[in-house]
Structures are given as C-alpha cells and as structure tokens.
Image (tube, rainbow, N blue to C red):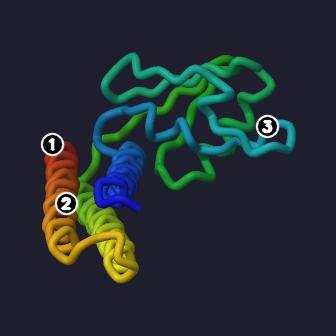
Amino acid sequence: MPYEDILLEAEERMEKSLHFLREEYRKVRTGRASTGLVENIKADYYDTPTPIKQLATIGVPEPRLIVIKPFDPAALHAIEKSILKSDIGITPSSDGKLIRLAVPPLSEERRKQFVAQTKEMAEQAKIAIRNERSAAIKTAEKEQKTGDMSEDDLEEFKKDAQKTTNEYTDKVDSLCNAKAEELMEV
C-alpha cells in the first residue's frame, strides 16, 4: 500500500473521531436551548425505539425554549415519556399538540461539571487520534519490512503522521475550548 494511501486512511479515521466529538458536544447541555439536546433521544413509537427527530419537528423559538411538534399526535406521549427518562434534566410540558421544554439556566457548579465532562470527551478523542497514528505507523513498518517502502520513506511517513496527528489534536483542543467557553457563559 503506498505511503499516501496509508496516511489518507489514518486521516479519514482521525476526521471521524473529530466528527464524533462534535456530535457528542451537541448533546452536552448549555444554558441555551439546542435541538441537539433532544433530537437523538429514542422514543418507543409502536414498540420501535425511534429518534425524536424522526417523529417530530424540533424548533428553538427562544434562547431558552425547545418546542417539539410530533408528526403523529399519537407519538406525543411516547416522546414526552422518553424525555422524562433521559438524563437531560428538563421536564417537558405538553398541551396535547406540542411539547415545550424550558431550558433552565445552569448553576456555576453544574457548568463546571459539564466543562470537566467536555475535557474528558476531548481526551478520549485525542487518544483515538493517537491510536490511529500508531496503527498507520505499524502498517507502514510492515510495508517497509516487505520491501514496498524504503527506510527513508518510512521516516518521512512517521514525520507526516505526527504532523497530521498534531493538527487533529489541535482541532480537538480548539473544539474543547470553544465548548468550555460556551458552557461558562451566563
């Protein structure tokens, strides 16, 4: 396998780790309303766990309010029940047609807990990125042993793999810092 292909595959997997972190950060509650808080919560719709985003339109008409309007009125109770069971800590209120979620402001202590949680998530993403670098280097070393890659190319590959790893860990750090800032905002 050529040098560039190994690096490209590793970079694609690193990008997936970064994408996963972004998705996880969308689920972390800030003091502001966000559709990401509820869209992937699964409701038991006709005995099938279905994400709320497939059962209803989700909107944020105000900074501290999420409104959920089910496509099928029969799904209202199932959505409400699934939100209560979830760990987002918001009690839904329903008028029979819509579900409203008033997002309360977070306490200082709770914001700090969420910041610690986001830092832990970032660390897990960095570990995954470094693991991808290690796997790519192992693949390149096998290529070098079989004679498909020269020693000079292997050394150059290791430098490029480290450079790519550093770029992705920097992206993780900037994502983490932005999320921490967002969380500490009152």
Determine which residue is flagged by label 2: 169
Q: In this view, does 138 lie above or below 68?
A: below
Q: Residue lying farthest front?
A: 147
Q: Residue lying farthest bottom?
A: 145
Q: Is residue 186 above or below residue 142?
A: above
Across and down, in percent, residue 65 comes to: 40, 27
Q: Nearer the viewer, residue 83 or 48?
A: 48
Cα–Cα gap, marks 1 and 3:
37 Å
Q: Residue lying farthest right?
A: 46
Asked if disc 1 and disc 3 are in contact, CB closer than 8 Å, the reply is no
User: Of helix, strand and loop, which one carries label 1?
Assistant: loop
Mark with earlier residue (1, 2)? 2
Res. 185 mark: 1
Front: mark 1 or 3: 3
Q: Quadrant of residue 141?
A: bottom left
Cα–Cα gap, marks 3 and 2:
40 Å
Across and down, in percent, residue 17 comes to: 37, 56
**Residue 1 visible within the image:** yes
* Type of the residue with mark 2: Thr
